[in-house]
Amino acid sequence: MEAHPRPRRRPPRLYRLSRLQALRARERVRANRHVDRGYRALIGVLGGCIVVLGLIMVPLPGPGWLVVIAGIALISTEFHWARRLLRFTRRKVLAWGRWVAAQPLWVRGVLGLGTFLFVSAVVYGLLLVTRLHESFLPAGLLPEWTGL
């Protein structure tokens, strides 16, 4: 009877290796109580700054809510309350996406138009307040009624 050759083990993927290294490093940090507290504080402050930056970006055109969620995801690596908040947010965003997808085309069109009008109003307001358009648009290009 012939012996079957052993199946060759595949080497671990790069992602798994880097994840293992990160987990081992985190365990070394967790072993020292003072370093662990500092690390958790650093993660909390960095994540909080990212959340604040995202909240500032929310009314502006761009990925404001995505940045807020990224900040919460960073904080959730160390704090249980942030993990719960991230799960809650994920459930609500998925439910909203399912609800929008189930709506008739005209409702989705109204939602898209409303979003477009809101973003346009924010950009218009920013241009009025900052007078930023004066630096890159020639004078007289825009009609008087725009106020720009």
Image (cartoon, rainbow, N blue to C red):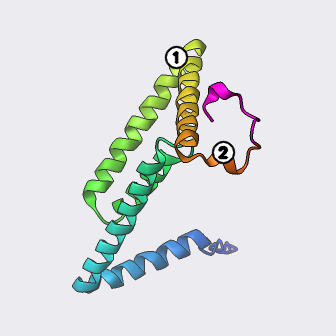
* Front-most of residues 19 and 44: 44
Q: Position of residue 112 (x, y in %)?
A: 58, 25
Residue 101, quarter of the rendered image: top right
In percent of the image, x 41 and y 43: which residue is there?
90
User: Which disc number belongs to residue 103?
Assistant: 1
Residue at 43%, 37% in the rendered image: 93
Return the residue found at the far left: 33
- Answer with mark 1 or mark 2, whichever residue precedes in sequence: 1
Residue 147 is covered by the magenta coloring: yes
Which residue type carries mark 1? Answer: Gln
**Residue at the spot 56% in from the left edge and 20% down from the top edge:** 108
Image location (x, y in percent) of residue 19: 49, 72
**68 on left or right of 103:** left
Residue 33 placement, left or right of 96: left
Mark 1: secondary structure: loop
Q: Amino acid at mark 2?
A: His
Q: Which residues are magenta?
A: 139-148
Do callouts 1 and 2 mark residues in contact (Cβ within 8 Å)? no
Instruction: Tell me the CA gap for discs 1 and 2.
Output: 38 Å
Residue 76 placement (x, y as % from top left):
35, 59
On the image, numbered disc 2 is attached to which residue? 133
Mark 1 is surrounded, within 10 Å at the Cα level, by few (under 14), some (14 to 19) or many (20 or more) other residues, namely few
Q: Where in the figure is residue 136, as x and y percent of width and height?
A: 73, 49
Q: Name the front one of labels 1 and 2.
A: 2
